[in-house]
Image: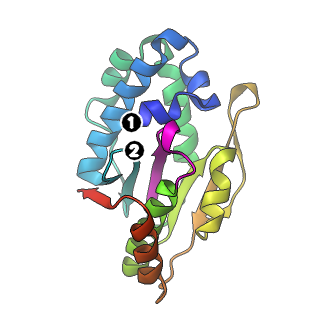
Amino acid sequence: MIADAVHPSPLAAWLVPDEAQRAHVLAAVAEMWVEHAMFYGEVHLVDDLSAASVCFRRYGPLPPPTDYANRLAALAGPRADRFTALHDLLATAQPSEAHHHLACLVVRPPFQRTGRGQALMADLRNRLDHIDVPCWTATLPIGQRLLARNGYEPDQAITLADGLTLHPMRRSAHRSSSTTTAVAHASCQNPQVQRRQ
């Protein structure tokens, strides 16, 4: 699912220029990070498996996936250096304070603009407000509007090669009495969110 959603993006094309290999490599690397999130974060899906979010609880130092360098080299081949460069840039931009890291929120192309992404964001907002921690993410320009609508504020952009930019965004910690109502409203109109922890 993650590979399907990310495949058309300029980030995917930069990570894996060979279109014939792109879907396979993206799926393999995504599987490694989803596995890691099952231990150090959480994975949330809508019930028809058309959208997902992957988060990490960065409340202290977080180790990389087991045998990360060797596994990445085996999965990504000659493009492993690009995944490593992306990982290092994001690590440098990460806040030093304890926070929730929204690593990715994806919706498969046939289901985009149907409210699924907003349902996942509302569910995440509800959980974050209950534990009162900030959240950080980095997005392509296409994701900025959804994040801004959910209280995320932009930070300095990260520039990769060829003019490709990622936009870090942060949502401050706060509690909201209206959050539960917002989630209930989103859930009534969209597939239910399932949690994998």
Pointer 1 with pointer 2, Cβ within 8 A: yes
Point out residue 37 in the picture as x, y percentages from the top left corner. 31, 48
* Cα distance between the residues tagged 1 and 2: 7 Å
For the point 33% across and 16% down, which residue is it?
74
Foreground label between 1 and 2: 2
Task: Please say if 15 is above or below 89.
Answer: above
- Here the colouring is rainbow
Work out which quarter of the rendered image holds the N terminus and state it: top left
Left or right position of 78 against 141: left
Categorize mark 2 by other alpha carbons within 10 Å: few (<14), some (14-19), many (20+).
many
Q: Nearer the viewer, residue 111 or 29?
A: 111
Nearer to me, 186 or 20: 186
**Is residue 96 visible from the viewing direction of this image?**
no
Residue 176 against residue 81 in the figure, above or below: below
Q: Position of residue 167 (x, y in %)?
A: 66, 49
Q: Is residue 91 visible?
A: yes
Q: Which residues are magenta?
A: 100-114
According to the picture, the residue beneath numbered tag 1 turns out to be: 1
Name the residue nearer the viewer: 21 or 1.
Answer: 1
Q: Earlier in the sequence, mark 1 or mark 2?
A: 1
Is label 2 in a helix, a strand or a loop?
Answer: loop
Please say whether residue 25 is one of the residues in the magenta stretch.
Answer: no
Q: Tell whether 21 sits left or right of 66.
A: right
> In this figure, what is the number of numbered marks?
2
Quadrant of res 65 = top left
Does residue 44 sit above or below 84 in this rendering?
below
Q: Mark 1 is on which residue type?
A: Met
Instruction: Name the residue beneath numbered marker 2.
Output: 50
Q: Residue at x 76, y 31 (%)?
A: 163
